[in-house]
Image: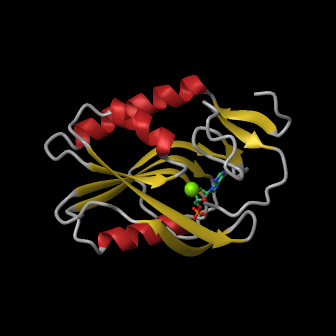
Amino acid sequence: MNDPNIGRIVVDEHELQQRIRDLGKAIATDYDDHPPLLVGILKGAFMFMADLARAIDLPVEFDFMAVSSYGSATRTSGVVRIMKDLDLDLTDRHVLIVEDIVDSGLTLAYLSKNLRARGAASLEVCALLVKEGLQKVETELKYVGFRIPPDFVIGYGLDVDERYRNLPYIAEFTGAVEQKFT
Ligand code: IMP
Ligand code: MG
């Protein structure tokens, strides 16, 4: 795409696909005798979820949740609203949250607490990206794709005002970030 706001490529398409294949293999090994329910966090994780699921050679099941974190332009506040809740009951399920990116960690901390209260047998997190050094709260991440510098990034599900989600790679966003996180 010829767009001056698409900056340096942080993770290219090949690296993404290779790492996701490895994550899928690790998950298939760990969950061999108890296939997980994958819970994708919309919208950002939709592309990662689709590729990751195809890399897990187990009879996984799917559900999705949409959340909105309110804050200033580039910072989440930790106030999270559930826009779309899960369809499935989590009782006794082995839940694996599939998240696009962990920044402050506040969204994930809220989600983990919320889902943990629903009686799952286990709850783990697979995050494609983690921004280095920005986590305000400790969240245990069992699977991490890439640790990246704390710049605002786009592509492969990640947006600025709903754009750039279809880029097949992760790039730095060099325009002005004036969006509400979704
Ligand atoms: P946290 O609560 O600060 O960890 O923010 C997590 C959410 O903010 C993610 O699920 C993303 O939707 C969004 N977010 C954080 N950093 C970025 C970014 O660099 N690009 C696009 N979205 C981001
Ligand atoms: Mg998001």
Q: Is residue 60 above or below residue 130?
A: above
Q: Residue furthest top?
A: 14
Tell me if 8 is positioned left or right of 62 in this view: right
> Where on the picture, by quarter, is residue 5?
top right
Q: Residue furthest left?
A: 33
> Where on the picture, by quarter, is residue 135?
bottom right
Residue at 46% in and 64% down: 139
Tell me if 138 is positioned left or right of 93 in this view: right
Query: In which quadrant of the rendered image does the N terminus lie?
Result: top right
Residue at 43% in and 67% down: 111
Tell me if 2 is positioned left or right of 116 in this view: right
Query: In which quadrant of the rendered image does the C terminus lie?
Result: bottom right
Q: Position of residue 41 (x, y in %)?
A: 46, 55
Tell me if 141 is positioned left or right of 60 in this view: right
Residue at 74% in and 60% down: 179
Q: Position of residue 91 (x, y in %)?
A: 19, 66
Q: Position of residue 107 (x, y in %)?
A: 52, 66
Q: Is residue 128 above or below residue 67?
A: above
Q: Nearer the viewer, residue 34 or 149?
A: 34
The quarter of the image that holds ligand 1 is bottom right
Q: What is the count of numbered marks?
A: 0
User: How is the structure coloured here?
Assistant: secondary structure
Q: Nearer the viewer, residue 152 or 161?
A: 161
Residue at 55% in and 27% down: 15
Q: Is residue 120 above or below residue 152?
A: below
Q: Nearer the viewer, residue 41 or 148?
A: 41
Q: Position of residue 121 (x, y in %)?
A: 19, 62
